[in-house]
Structures are given as C-alpha cells and as structure tokens.
Amino acid sequence: MNPSTSLPSRPADLLPSEVPLSLIDPAGRPAPEGELTMPADEVLQRLYRGMVLGRRFDVQATALTKQGRLAVYPSARGQEAGEIGAVLALREQDWLFPTYRDSMAVVARGVDPVEVLCLLRGDWHCGYDPARERVAPQCTPLATNTLHAVGLAHAATVKGEDTVALVLLGDGATSEGDTHEALNFAAVFNTPTVFFVQNNGYAISVPLAKQTHAPSLAHKGIGYGIRSVLVDGNDAAAVYAVVSAAVARAAAGEGPTLIEAVTYRIESHTNADDATRYRDRAEVESWLVKDPVSRLANYLTERGLLDEQAGAALDATAEAQAAQLRARMNVDTVSDPRDLFRHVYAQQTPALRRQEQELLAELAVTEATEEDHR
Amino acid sequence: MNPSTSLPSRPADLLPSEVPLSLIDPAGRPAPEGELTMPADEVLQRLYRGMVLGRRFDVQATALTKQGRLAVYPSARGQEAGEIGAVLALREQDWLFPTYRDSMAVVARGVDPVEVLCLLRGDWHCGYDPARERVAPQCTPLATNTLHAVGLAHAATVKGEDTVALVLLGDGATSEGDTHEALNFAAVFNTPTVFFVQNNGYAISVPLAKQTHAPSLAHKGIGYGIRSVLVDGNDAAAVYAVVSAAVARAAAGEGPTLIEAVTYRIESHTNADDATRYRDRAEVESWLVKDPVSRLANYLTERGLLDEQAGAALDATAEAQAAQLRARMNVDTVSDPRDLFRHVYAQQTPALRRQEQELLAELAVTEATEEDHR
Amino acid sequence: MSTVAERLPELAAAPIPVTMAGALNQALADALATDERVLVFGEDVGTLGGVFRVTDGLATRFGENRVFDTPLAESAIVGTAIGMAMNGLRPVVEMQFDAFAYPAFEQITSHLAKLRNRTQGRVELPIVIRVPYGGGIGGVEHHCDSSEMYYAHTPGLRVVTPATPADAYTLLRQAIDCPDPVIFLEPKRRYWAKETTVLEPAGAGIDRAVIRRTGSDVTLISYGGALGTTLEAAEAAAEDGISAEVIDLRSLAPFDEDTVAAAVARTGRAIVVHEASRFCGYGAEVAAQLSERCFHYLEAPILRVAGFDIPYPPPNLESHHLPSVDRILDAIDRLQWPDAVNGTKAGR
Amino acid sequence: MSTVAERLPELAAAPIPVTMAGALNQALADALATDERVLVFGEDVGTLGGVFRVTDGLATRFGENRVFDTPLAESAIVGTAIGMAMNGLRPVVEMQFDAFAYPAFEQITSHLAKLRNRTQGRVELPIVIRVPYGGGIGGVEHHCDSSEMYYAHTPGLRVVTPATPADAYTLLRQAIDCPDPVIFLEPKRRYWAKETTVLEPAGAGIDRAVIRRTGSDVTLISYGGALGTTLEAAEAAAEDGISAEVIDLRSLAPFDEDTVAAAVARTGRAIVVHEASRFCGYGAEVAAQLSERCFHYLEAPILRVAGFDIPYPPPNLESHHLPSVDRILDAIDRLQWPDAVNGTKAGR
Ligand SMILES: Cc1ncc(C[n+]2csc(CCOP(=O)(O)OP(=O)(O)O)c2C)c(N)n1
Ligand SMILES: Cc1ncc(C[n+]2csc(CCOP(=O)(O)OP(=O)(O)O)c2C)c(N)n1
Ligand SMILES: [Mg+2]
Ligand SMILES: [Mg+2]
C-alpha cells in the first residue's frame, strides 16, 4: 500500500489544467484535441438518454412542488452532464454518495424515482435501500458525505474488495472542514474515492467568488497530494471520460482523485428560493447557451448518432416516465406512526415501547371520537 | 478590498519552493544566495539571545515537572528558531496566537514566565492578560486558534487598524477542519493573518508521513489562493526573514501567508510521553546536528558578532533567569476557590451565588474541624 | 421592494403589527444603527437577507463591511466571531438551521463558553449566535432539531428563546448588549406569527421568565415554539374549569427558578412542555429542580409533555411528535386532582 | 517489553488482578481476535498504543490494517467509521479526550445517531466511540469534561460507562457486538484502579444498571468516575447507622428505569451523584423520572450531588468541584429523616 508509486513525479503535475478539460464545445463541435479520449458512441447515446430522462424527471419534480405533492425540490437543471456523466461512469459494484441536489443522479443509477422523492414528499427519510442500490442516502449536512465515502472505500480496501466510492458535493461544501479532512484521509490511506465537485457557481445565494479565492477548486488537490482535474461540467462526454479514468485509477489502487466540474444551476436553489434576489437574468442566459443537453444532441446529430425519430422516441419515453411519476406521486401515502419508534435502535427500548403505546392509545381515542361524530 | 491585485499572476507562483528556504546552513555557513535577505546584525543578535534564553527557559520548565512543580510541560527544544524567529518578526501592535507548545514564544513576546506556566502548574487557566500582552491564551484544542486569529485580524481591517495576527500551529493540526476553514476565510476576506506551521515531524507519535500525503504542507496554500512559503525551521534568520515579509505584506493589505517551517521536536511530546516508543535515536541524532542555536552561534562567531565573552554573559543571564524562575515557581500558590464562580458569566447568576455559598460553608466547616483537631 | 428594515423604524413608537421575523430584523437594524461594533454575518445573510429573511435589507443599509456573507463553514463563523470579539467587536452570527450549528460545537463549547473563565474575566465574548430551531414547519431531516439542551448544559453560555415578536425584539437587543455569549434560539414556526405591539429594547430582563397567563390550579411551563400550544391548552382547560397558569421561560440558561418556583408553590401542580425529546431534555432540569424545591407543595408529580425520544420525524408524521393541546390536557388530567378516584396523595 | 494484550489471554479464565486500562485492552484484543470485522483506529492508537495505553500492543498483534493511527481529525475519524460500517465493518474508534470529541459532534449527532432511523433500519452502524472522560486526574483544561449529557440526549445513541475493570471488559465486548452505535465513556480516573476478577464477555446486559451495594434507607445512584466516591460514602453512612444502597447505572442511555425505580420505591429516598455539572446534567433526568414514577413513595425530594455549574476547574481546584464523600453524606443528612426537626413531610 505505497500510494506514491503511481503519482506524478513532480508535485506541480498534481495541478489541474488552467482551463476546464472538454471534448465537445458549447456549440456541439468536437473540442480541440486534448488529453481526454472521446467515449464510445454507445456511451454517448446512453449519456444523452440519461440527460433527457433526467431533465424531464427534474422538471416533473419541480412541477410536483407547485401541486403540493413535494414539500421542496432542489433542481439540478443545467447540471445534467455532471449528474449523469459521473454516475454512468460507475461500475455495478461501486457506490454513489449523493447530496440533496442529486436526485437525478440517483435515478440515473437505477433507483425508483418515487423512492428517491420519498424524503422530499414529506414521507419517511430515505426511500430506498442504500445497500441494495449501492447509493447512500441523499445527504443534507454539507460535506459530511465525503467522509462516509472515504470510509466505505477504505473498508473495501481492507476487505480486499474492488469497490470505488464516488461522492458528489457542491462548490459551497468545499469550504466545510469535513471536505478537507476527507481529502486528507483519502490521500493518506490511498482510498479508492472519487470526489466530484459540481461547481454550479452558487451556494444558495453566495457566489463562488465569495466562497473561495483559489485559482480553481481543483487546485486544492495538490495540498493533499491528490491528482486533480478541472473539467467542463456541461460536457457530458468530458465528465464521463474524466470520472471513468478516476474510477479506473482508484480501482487499480492508484488512490483518490479530485474533480471539479464547472457548471451552473439554472433554477433557484430550491423552489422555495428566489434567485432573482442575488443574480441577474443575463448571467443565467449566458449559461443557457452552454446547455449540456442540446450540446450533446448537436454533437450526436452531427455525427449521425441521433436522428429526429430517435429523438422523438426518447422524448416520448421521457414524457411517459414523467406521467407515470406524476400518477404515482398523486397517490396519497399513509405513513405508519409506529415507524416513529421502530428504527431508533435495533431493538426497541422499554421507553420507546411505552411511548409508542401512548401514541397508539391517543390515536385510538381520536379515531373513536371521529367515529362518534359520524 | 480587492485581494487579487497583489497576488502573483500565475497560480503556480503561489506554490512554495521545492526545498525549504534558508539563509544559514546547518554548519552555520551562509546558504547559497536565494530570495531571502539576511536580517540586520542587530536582529541576528536578538534572535540568538532569544533562542538561548528560550532554550534555558524550556529546560527549566522540563526540570520543574520532575520536581512536581509543573503538572506537565510540552517542550519546544529544537524548535527555538521557529518559536523565536516568528515572534521577533512581530510588531508591537500585532497579536500572537500560540499553542500549548509555544510557551517559549510567549515568553519571547515579553510575558512573565510565571504567568505563562500558570496553567501547566495546575493553577488558573491563562496566567496573563491577553489584551494587554496581545497574546491569546495558549490553545489546546488543535487548530481552533487559527480561526480566532483570522477573526481578530479581520476585525482589525474592519476597524481600520494596522494589526497582524500570527497564529502558530503544528503539522498535526493542519489535518483538522478548522485549519482549512481558517485558511479559506483568511483568503476570502483577505485578512492580515500569518499562518506559521511548525512541522516538527510528529503529532505526538504520528509521523508526518501518516499525517499527510502532500508534497509539503505549504502546498496547501494554492488551494485557497494563498501565498505559501517553505522555510528551514531551524534557521532563525530565514524564519525571521520569511515571517517579517509575511507580516509586512499582511500589513500592506496583501492578505494572508501560509508558512511551513520544517523542524524537529527533540524531546518527547510532553514529559509524560515516551518518544522511544515510536522513533529511534538515530533520527533524533540526525536532527541534533542541525541544532538551531549552535547554528546561529557559529554564524555569528564567524561574522564576529558573537565572542566568547558575550556568549558567557548571555549564558549567565539565562542561568540567572532560570534560577529566578525556579525560585518563583517554588513558592506555593494558593488558589481562591471563589474564583471558580467568578468568571463564568459577567455577573454571577443566582445559582452560582448559591453554589459558591455552599462551597464556602463547607470550607468553613472543614476549617473549624481542623481547628478542633489542633 | 422596500425591506422590513426600511419600513419599520418610523413606526416603532406606536403599536404596529409585526411578525417575529420582522421584529428580529428590526432588532438587528437598531443594534447596527446604535452600536458600530455590531456586525452581522453568516451564510446567505447578506445579499439574500437570510433564508428566513431575518436579515433582509441590512447589507444594503449598513454596507458589506458590517453585514456580510461568509463561506460555508459554521465552525469558521463562530471561530472568527470569537477572534473579532477579542478585538472589540460584537458579532451577531446566524447558523442557518439548528442541525447546521453542530459543526461549530467545538468552538462553542471549548471556546465561546469558556474563554471568559479561562482568562479570569479578561477576555469577554459578547457574541450572539442566532439559531432558527425546532419543528412544526414541515421541514425535512436536519432542519427541525431542538438543540437547546446541548447549550443549556454548557456553563458559560446563555440560552434564550423568544415566543412572541415583542420578546424577539427585546431579547435580541438585550442579547446583543449582553457581555456574555448568547445562544439565541428562534422558534422557526413562530417566524410568521403576527402581533400588534411596540418594540422596546428594554423589558423583562434577559434572564427572566414571564407569566403569560395567570391561573391557580396548575402551572404550565413552556418556551419557544411550544408556548403557543401551551396557551391554547390553558384556554381549553379553562373551559373544563381548570385555571392554568402559563409561564414562558424565555431564558433557558440561566433558569429563572425563583419566578417558576413561586408559581408552582402557589398551584401545587406543574407540567413542562417542550418540543425537544423528553429524555435528558430541558424539562428534566425544570422537573428536578422544582421537585426538590417545591417538594412539600406538590400535590402531584411534575409531568413533562415533550417530543418522543426519537430523531425528529418527517413532515408527514411530525404532528404526532409535537406536544399537542390534547396531550397537555391529558397531562393535566393525570395531575391527581382531589376528586379523582385513584392516585391521589391521600390514596397512597 | 510484553504488552498487556500479550500477557493476559492465558489468565483470562481465572480471577486475575487487572486495571481498567488492562481490561479494556483485553476486550479490544479479544474482539479483534474473535471478529475479523472489528477495526481499531484513532489518534496515536497504533504504534504508541494510545495516550492511556488502552490499545497497547494491538497494532503489533493484529497488524496495521486492523489497528492504525489516523491523521489528526476527529470528524474524519467518526465520519470514516460510518462509511466503514456501511461497508460491513465494526469500527472501534478513540477520541483522545472528552473535549476532543466535539469536532465530531455533527457526524455523531446528524449521522451516527440517525442513520438507522433515516433508512428505516436498512443501514446499521455498529460503531463504538471510546471516550476517556471526566476529571480527577489533575488534567489541564479541555481534558476533564463530563460530556455524557450531550450524547444521552441524542436519540439513537447508546451511552455506557463502566466503573470497574470487570465491567469495562464486559461492557466493551457488548458494545462492540451491539448493532447500535455506542458512546463508550471511560472514566479516566479509574484507568489504573485494580480489581481481581474474571473477565467475561457476557454479564448484566449492556442496558442494565446493577446494584453494587444493598441497603434499605436510601438509594445512591451513580456511575463512572463518581461511583467509587459514592461507595465510600455508603460505607461512611453505615457507620452513622444509615443503610445506603448503591446503584451503578452503567447504561446512561437507555436508562434502566425499572431497576432504579424499584430500588427507590423500596427506600423512599434517593440521591444521584455525578461529576458533570448539575444544571441540565444527567441527574436531572434521573430525578425527574423518579420523582414522577415514585412520587408516592418518596419521603424526601431526590437530591443531586454533582459538579458545580462551571467549566471544569484547573487541577489545584478540582477537588472542590468533584462530588466528595462529605458532600454525599451531607446530602443524606438533608433527606428529611423522621427524627429531623424541620422539613419532614408531616411538618409541611
Ligand atoms: C452543514 C450545513 N450547513 C448549512 C446547510 C444549509 N444549506 C443547504 S444547501 C446550502 C448551499 C450549498 O451549496 P453547494 O455546496 O454549492 O451546493 P448546491 O446547493 O449549489 O448544489 C446550504 C448553505 C447545510 N445543508 N449543511
Ligand atoms: C482537537 C484536538 N484533538 C486532539 C488533541 C490531543 N493532542 C494534543 S497535542 C496532539 C498532537 C498535535 O500535533 P501537532 O499539531 O503536530 O503539534 P505538536 O504537538 O507537534 O507541536 C494531540 C493529538 C487536541 N489537543 N485537540
Ligand atoms: Mg453550488
Ligand atoms: Mg508536530
């Protein structure tokens, strides 16, 4: 377990490029030849499919907040290349550690969207089975999930298993102490962890310039002896290429990678936020032009990998999935109050048993009273 | 308050040198011409004086633990160049934020050594008046003082005062989240803060290689957009030059600097620790050869700035100060139990008043009983 | 769009309808205007005006030097506030939600609470940490903790929590003026509660409980987000012929034991009501102190109506968790009234 | 030099003299030997064997893969332990001293305590956090906190604390086997206390209090570092003709209310003794619960002998702060015995 063998020999080689790596430019044309290799056509098509379905899911989720079916939803619109590109680069056995913003990524990983939205719907906390899905619960306390990812990855090494942990975090979360401690632990223990920072320009209302004074967030890597990559976060092909390479390096025992994907949050922080309070329309417009979905569409079309028919079919699938989601979310769920007491400890304590009984007795009285009033 | 103006234009210029900067080599000869300027002769003499007195103080303090006069003492032997060099570079109006290891630095700043040892003697916590001395209480919870230093420095900026805050921390402390948050805040708010990391090779028993995988600790600076310097921590002249420059830049509104001083802890972590459990004698020997005090002595002698007579006089002063300290520390102190309740809040709460009365009543009974037994 | 801070000042002398968020905003504005050592900072408190709009308009009015956004790091917010206070300023910082204050726990516990004591009174930290706390707003996980006990058990901290707009104003002004560090807990679900009142910087002391409703049969003791429910319960009890006194603690640390003990000695029965989990919750201290001090006056044990001993539940279930009027009335029923068949003192 | 871990195994069947530190070392060694999912890590726990030598020899015996030093970052220690547990391991981590666990407070409170609940039981975190806690060893600031209340008030955590070497062994083995996260508080001042005993992995359940001394007049309830003083006080009380029962709580969360309430119902008088500050301290919960549950059995209020409401004092003054035999005896005196002149129930 000598982590240094595979690292570049000169420290400065740990630094990221000065401009974000990319494969496809905003207009959908191939970017100038660089260090990245274009993913296979079939991968590009899967990326495109994931992004179209992801965006439709995201729009649907936002709509559900307006209908009162979701309490709150943090949209990832505009970040589809990062959300999908990173997740598709994972292998079956790898783990994903997402945040509240990454519902789209969790869906792309194969989790039932209704389960994904369980928490935001006001129902029980984490809708899915993390171990089965190999997806941690979406994490709200910022940056805390970076440490979980490092621990999970280190455990894999200890157990001799080939598992990589990919953790998603935002630009804001990089300021938290936990991010620092996680990068350091990952480097020292040479854990198979990929840190994927989606720099979407804002932490709620706080712009990147007030968050850091670093040349780029990826410049943090060298301070831990970690390889760092700066990538165009709106270029799904580049994100996929970069994350795949990092996963491969991690799996080969070459340790962690820090990736900063430069992107933009098109919507407000959540539906409850009003982004016009802190940024102007022109800025948003400038990013709409760099839209990750149409960028890849243009490229694929140009390359003959996407035609109108396939596009329409995909749109129809997206619509159908959205309709299905809508329908399923319109079913009222009934939460079982007994769940309150079931999972606090492996075995219910006497005090919790008593509290449960008190609540059930109370509910029985209420029900009886309601009966009486009928 | 545009912090970027004075920074190097290319990010890579924020990186430290690959080898530690120095002015005087381990044998006491001038180091090859480099980017540092040799301090004035008078400064070198003050540095030497501070180191000799500091070392003698340190030895005395360790001796006091053996006599049971100090509960515990963390020696800084071997780190005199860092402790003294950094502190002498401060101006009158600047603030020092030391750790438990930096008693020597606090004494060099002018605080009464008996006050400095107050805490370690088992008496009240912080012996001196921080505001009067412009020295924060010696800090034990690692890395937490970095944030206090940043806050104090930022307040100075807000108030339009010319005050720089110098914070001392160890290699181990750089792993804590607070260090990261402090470096980031300092950079974002462009505060006049100097971070002086004494990399003495160990955090208690944990060697640097298990603490970080970075090329150097100074390589962390670029991740915050902070200028970083790697300096020979056993070269008092170099430390002084580097810290002075950082203080001057901070005072000129050019923001924080991260300095890593490479040095070695000759003694165990504290008198209660046994360093032979985790490092071998050969390693210690290899550092004894680089001794900061004799190094400067050799240089000064060579330059004709120190002769036998002056050396002997200084030694005598050091002895006298040590004797005085010993004598003063041999006086038993009486702690007033009422102090327990006096400073919890600005005004004593009724509950504390009652608790104080209970204790005083109890003590009166004990005293009466003791009287009886006489 | 004019901000709350701009709209209020001229009205402050006459009673005005104001929400708790508005009153807090006004308190910050007035403190900033009165004392140039006051600074306000935290996550999103500048341009955005805070996620609850409590700092709305302040950055514009007082400038970015005094009201500003920080990078996203709570330990740093508290830690730098400590350094600023050491340099003579009076920082008022915001933790965006209760659970997001936990990263600052070391700075709060080991430094903020102790620095005065560690320096024998030479270093003073007049810092206010504002924490929107508690549930009742359908918030998702980590957004509804009642964390008062962590702070109340830490000597050196003051912990206060207003339950009304008028008190929010007064207590925040007092907290900012206070030489001790104050954990200022703002009950989220009261932010939009309106009251027509005069906002006054002085009032009952920062360490005093107040009697919100007088009564002679039982003393209900509550604070913060649960006070409203407690008052409703008192109202309902009156219909059943029980005269309930309601005390609003306001200051959790120190605890105004004299006011509360006097009331309980009078009524002989008491119930503590709070949202936080019962086990090792604040009600335990109240019950323990009163049980000791009022032992011979008590006709029944002191009961606690509190959250269950569970992590704060998801929105769909939170109503089961929170103290309700029914649960308080039920507790009142269990207070061993003389005409009850079982369980009277006599029946022992 | 042979380590404790190497010296003990062959002796484990017969009663041996062992310190608490030795018993803990043995428990770790046996757990590591029995269950390959067990890992031990933290600051200085590898090569050095811990600043209290509790992990002495383990790295050598079990290899650096299973017993290792980490970088200096407590949040990371707990946070990575969580990730490891999610991947099937059973980490036992050390926080070097009580106050140095505070940087991990967010990971402990928002994740360790809640993850089982947040995933409806699908994610289990069988993690033990060992925390040397409390005073009585002349430690300097930040090294003597009694932090049990912060954890006990957090649903989802178990909090246990041994007071004897035998219990240290048993409870630590049980804690490691337990599917819930356990905050394992080791009373520093008992580390070198010796007992001749057989170390057994099973014993009273991890959630059970035990009666350390039977008595009929008063129940003294204590735990951890204060238990020794409490037993001495019981001894001294016996000389005054008062028969004191002593309960060692062992498990602070959950609280073994049945055992304790039965004892108190029997004696009618109770005193809780702990080092932590009284205000909002653990004794408050004990007193509040017992006052409610044993209301009609109580001849006197439940008293608390606890630390003052102050930050832990410097070594020269700590003896004033800690519960003492005298203070416990004095509290016993105040329990309104029938022959007392004032303050009996009858005298009301
Ligand atoms: C420890 C912590 N502090 C504060 C918050 C409140 N909060 C939620 S999201 C957010 C901004 C996060 O920004 P970023 O990391 O850039 O992620 P993004 O929302 O842009 O995806 C804040 C401050 C939190 N969730 N956790
Ligand atoms: C937050 C925190 N965790 C743990 C400790 C215990 N501790 C005291 S000193 C020390 C090692 C510090 O090493 P380093 O920062 O390199 O400073 P040095 O002692 O070498 O000067 C440790 C772990 C502490 N004081 N604070
Ligand atoms: Mg962001
Ligand atoms: Mg060190």
Image: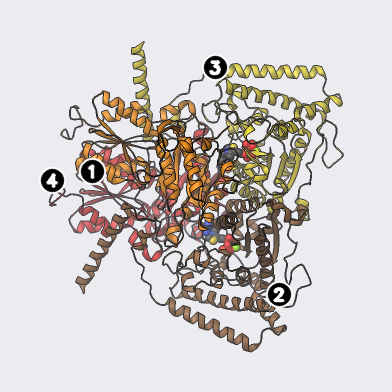
Chain colours: A brown, B yellow, C red, D orange
- Left/right placement of residue B317 relative to residue C100 reads right
Q: Disc 4 versus disc 2: distance between alpha carbons?
A: 84 Å
Q: Is residue C204 visible?
A: no
Residue ID at (56%, 50%):
D76
| Residue D121 drawn above or below residue D67 | below
Q: Nearer the viewer, residue B40 or D322?
A: D322
The verdict on a common chain for dots 4 and 2 is no
Which residue does the numbered mark 2 point to in the structure image?
A: A26
- Left/right placement of residue B61 relative to residue C269 reads right
| Residue A211 drawn above or below residue D18 | below
Asked if marks 3 and 4 touch (Cβ < 8 Å), the reply is: no
Q: Disc 4 versus disc 1: distance between alpha carbons?
A: 14 Å
Q: Position of residue D328 (x, y in %)?
A: 32, 29
Which residue does the numbered mark 3 point to in the structure image?
A: B331
Q: Disc 1 versus disc 3: distance between alpha carbons?
A: 54 Å
Residue ID at (47%, 78%):
A325
Residue type at mark 1: give it.
Cys
Say which mark, if any, is on residue C347. Answer: 4
Residue type at mark 2: give it.
Pro
Which chain is indicated by disc 1?
A: D
Q: Residue furthest bottom?
A: A309
- Left/right placement of residue D108 relative to residue B206 reads left
Which chain is indicated by disc 3?
A: B
The verdict on a common chain for dots 1 and 2 is no
Q: Which element type, helix, strand or loop, lies under badge 2?
A: loop
